[in-house]
Image: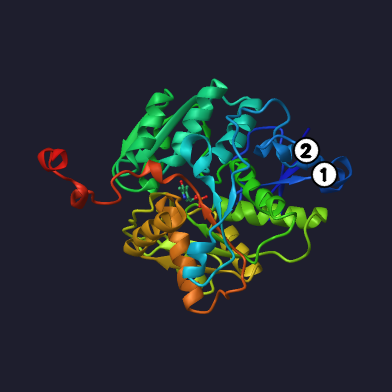
Amino acid sequence: MTYLELLECPRCGTTHDPHVLQNLCGCGSPLLARYDLGAVGKAVSKDDIAGRPADLWRYRELLPVAGDPVTLGEGWTPLLPAARYGVQIGLPRLLIKDEGLIPTGSFKARGAAVGVSRARELGAKHVAMPTNGNAGAAWALYAARAGIKATIAMPTAAPAITREECVAAGADLHLVEGTISDAAGVLATLDEFFNVSTLKEPYRLEGKKTMGYEIAEQLGWRVPDVIVYPTGGGVGLIGIHKALTELRQLGWIGPRLPRLVAVQSTGCAPIVKAFSQGLRKASPWIDAGTVAFGINVPAPLGDELMLDALYETGGTALAVPDEEILKDLKDFAGTEGMLLCPEGAACLTAARQLRASGWLSPHDEVVVLNTGTGLKYPGMFSLSAHTERASSAAR
Ligand SMILES: *Cc1c(COP(=O)(O)O)cnc(C)c1O
């Protein structure tokens, strides 16, 4: 049962019918799903939710899907203490929300599960999107499970495994020179498809917001002081902010929201630049490039929503260099036994720097999002120093 009521434009306030396929508002802004939260509060309690299966569909009243979902068991990932590493960087209350354990290997599965489920029930037969890899892989696999067609366009430089996931899923895969913005050009050559590009349809965001619900529920229905998020298209950041705002309206958490931190790479930092200038919109980043491929998004459509979330929560935005990301990824694996993705490791670099600068205090409870498994990124470290010749090893 869903309590979805309407789609609302956060920029111009126009409302739209949620019972047909929708893309952007006429004014060009993404649309946000709105629910009858009063009715949700009467129909379901925190205790009801506690007794439900360990996946994101435990929040189904707050999700847009009316019928049977397309699911691979996504959601309810662990929120793990990382106190040993935390103490080293001066943040003993550090926690990792580990999305590396989710189907398809990245948190894009959350958006794909809800987005594909809703697109199918509204009659879509063919979805198409440009991607930096993980979203395309997730949507291709969930589309296969849903029995609908997927066309995926991705940069040639995207992590190779994500191409193979698309091919295995039977998607129509297009490899494009350049960035995700260049890959978007492929869609112009297609006809008869539903455009599921980042934030161009309203329901991927609804899937990703469940990270916010889970963090609150896993902490016993309260929020941490700070949430640190690797920011590309910003769906997770906007989604977590939306989720916590909804929980606050329901009265399931108190009035205080965590300070949200958007982390980018120094190789692609449009949101950090706009934030540092106090702007409400970002301008496109030229010559974007970083090892943290999932956050290589030069011109995100959700810039206004992201910047609003940062300003409103008293958060901040920070860009970190690739060398430090890889160093922190390795330090963390050696200290805590978790192989993060570079995007997740970028958040550790940011947390370390924000502690050093005094923006974070040793008392802060800080949640870092690890948005995918490190297993998707072979070749991050040189192994030559560890290679022995067969003869010497046999001796
Ligand atoms: C897509 C992606 C991100 C960025 O997510 P957005 O919601 O687009 O900001 C971060 N990390 C990984 C591993 C990703 O695949």
Q: Which residue is drawn at 51% across and 74% down?
A: 355
Q: Which residue is drawn at 51% across and 65% down?
A: 86
The C terminus is located in which quarter?
top left
**Cα–Cα gap, marks 1 and 2:** 7 Å
Nearest the eye: 334 or 339: 334
Residue 200 appears in the picture as rendered = yes
Say whether residue 337 is left or right of residue 253: left
Say whether residue 279 is left or right of residue 118: left
Residue 36 appears in the picture as rendered = no
Query: Judging from the image, what secondary structure is the residue with disc 2 in?
Result: loop
Q: Which residue lies furthest to the left in this view?
A: 391
In which quadrant of the rendered view does residue 241 lie? Answer: bottom right
Query: Judging from the image, what secondary structure is the residue with disc 1 in?
Result: helix
Say whether residue 225 is left or right of residue 269: right
Q: Residue at x 58, y 31 (%)?
A: 116
The N terminus is located in which quarter?
top right
In which quadrant of the rendered view does residue 65 lie? Answer: top right
Visual colour scheme: rainbow
Q: Residue furthest top?
A: 147
Nearest the eye: 26 or 211: 211
Say whether residue 123 is left or right of residue 321: right
Q: Do the residues labelled 1 and 2 touch (CB within 8 Å)?
A: yes
Q: Which residue lies furthest to the bottom in this view?
A: 358
In which quadrant of the rendered view does residue 158 lie? Answer: top left
Residue 46's spot in the image, x, y percent?
Answer: 81, 46
Residue 375's spot in the image, x, y percent?
Answer: 39, 42
* Residue at image mark 2: 51
* Residue at image mark 1: 47
Q: Residues within 10 Å of mark 1 (few under 14, many from 20)?
A: few
Tell me the amino acid under the disc marked 1.
Asp
Tell me the amino acid under the disc marked 2.
Gly
Q: How crowded is mark 2: few (under 14 residues within 10 Å), some or many (20 or more)?
A: few
